[in-house]
Image (cartoon, coloured by chain):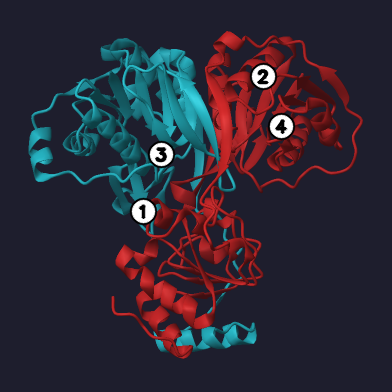
Amino acid sequence: MAVLALAEHRRGELRDPSFELVTAGRQLADAVGTDLHVAVVGGDVEGFADALDREGVDVIHTVDHGEEFVADVAVQALEGLVADGDVEHVLVPNTVNGLSTAPALAERLDRPIATDAVAIDVDEGVVVTRETYGGKTEATIEVDGEATVLTTRSGEWPPAEGTGDATVEAADVDIDDGAVRTRVSGFQEVGAGDVDITEADVLVSVGRGIEEAENIPLIEAFAEAIGATVSASRPIVDNEWLPKDRQVGQSGKTVQPDVYLAIGISGAVQHVAGMKGADTIVAINTDPSAPIYDIADYGIVDDLFEVVPALIEEFGGEVPDL
Amino acid sequence: MKVLVTISEVADVDDEFEIDGLEIDGRYLTYDLNEWDNYALEEAVQLAEADEDVEVLTATIGPERAEETIRQALAKGADRAIRVWDDALAEASVLDPLTKARVLAAIVEEEEPDLVLTGVQTADDSFGATGVALAAAIDYAWGAVVNDLDLEPGADTASVHRELEGGVEELAEVDVPAVLTIQTGINEPRYASLRGIRQAQSKPLEAEDLSGVGLAAEDLPLDLTLTDLAEPEVESDVELFEGGAEETAGQLAELLRDRGVSA
């Protein structure tokens, strides 16, 4: 019996969630009393296997096929490994590529899937804790059946450390290239503009609370008054009110400024992933239960359209006419 | 070419709310078109506007209440709609991704679209898994988290950008027929015009139960069960500035100056 965890890599490097998955996988394997196997599919499988040999890993299966991570290939490889071994639970990181892989695998194996777990417990079966309604609620979900596919949220488990003594095996699975219907032709960095928000010491970051494009100058005036750089959360960039290279978060940039001022930002997990490393976090938001206050050091629960003009005046700036 | 777009109606929760058993008290919920699906719909409608031979069909799993949201989608340019609901679905505490995928698969098998567009996720349950599970269920190719799509009607591959983490996009070719899960920001979703809203009233909206799409309750996995719903415990140690805007701004300004922030 085994728990099987899928490592993820991109452009020649293992991604951090792979090591967190080892920790989550070990915990689950202990809870059900079984071994932890790790699968690495594509890329420098031997180098990756070396790096993944951390404490708690029993077996590493390598599937040497192609350079980049392709979900089609990963699904086939995992299907093969599950068919060969006695795999109860398959763990996949809750990343873009993980979510491109796990649901297809679950459907092919006809196993239940629960995604974006922040905790996994074992009672009679697997019990997953996950956030719903944009993080406003936490749901506890029982997963029916002895065999599951689960994805784990990044940043919820510490990365596995230490050196393990895992057995590394080249997996005996055939990949049918005819059934691989997607091809990766390249990568591109988003919006390499003239401002690099990752270099800024102070960021004034704006979110949905600003309501309209016409109100953005208020934030720009504040940033100018305190010598800060303007960044944004996803909705602002989706609406094209600010360019893509200003986006902080999972799909944008990860920033670690001295001071991060989150204005009208609710603090969804995808945003927080990109800014939680800031030294001092200040939130201005009308909703006292907004998740941004869970990680903020200082906060003002008030209307940004009242507070920001007052701040601009404090610093001798000019409040724009909106 | 036929494009099928999945349309979900999702609940938005007020800032202040109460949980009643395993559900949020209905007084605190507002129902609307799922944000991601709005972008998927726009992408489909743009394909149809570029080529008159493109038909846009929407598929919804949801109760009769959802028809208002479906009419919105029709008003924005979809040609017709199918809605599936059943006691077996209504009684489930969680509509898990595989169950939704099986219901949608039944519609796809009947309609045989060339392209299926879904939102990356729904705003309420946020499994982010139904589209990819659907692709496996109907044996289509798939591309997840697409934020750029280039597809000539009749072509046998679609060129997509997939939004990965950390400001990186993957450029990929996906064989058609395909399921693509659409990310927000891929386009600028339109508002329905008055003319569109009028026309939507007479567009076909077909309501079916499970048997109507050739399924029975026992065909559905329904293997996730909600056992608890709670507000997350907050470990906040935020220091809140109190007072009117001028007072709080003054206190924050002092803090910022202490940290050496100035123009």
Q: Residue at the location (13% across, 44% down)?
A: B193
Asked whether the viewer can see residue B95, the reply is: no
Circle 1: element type: loop
Horizontal and vertical percent for residue B85? Answer: 29, 25
Q: Nearer the viewer, mark 2 or mark 3?
A: 2
- Tell me the CA gap for discs 2 and 1: 38 Å
Is residue A283 positioned above or below B89 on the image?
below
Disc 4 to disc 2: CB gap under 8 Å? no
Horizontal and vertical percent for residue A286? Answer: 40, 70
Q: What chain does mark 3 sit on? A: B
- The residue at which mark 3 appears reads as B122
Q: Which quarter of the figure has residue A50?
A: top right
Q: Are marks 3 and 1 on the same chain?
A: no
For badge 4, the amino acid type reads Ala
Q: Which quarter of the figure has residue B104?
A: top left
- Tell me the CA gap for discs 3 and 4: 26 Å
For badge 1, the amino acid type reads Asn
Is residue B87 rendered to the left or right of residue A81? left
Circle 2: element type: helix
Disc with the residue nearer the chain's start (1 vs 4) = 4
- Tell me the CA gap for discs 3 and 1: 19 Å
- The residue at which mark 2 appears reads as A78
Circle 3: element type: loop
- The residue at which mark 4 appears reads as A7
Q: Residue at the location (61% across, 61% down)?
A: A198
For badge 2, the amino acid type reads Leu
Q: What chain does mark 1 sit on? A: A
Identify the chain drawn in cyan: B
For badge 3, the amino acid type reads Thr
Front residue of A154 and B241: A154
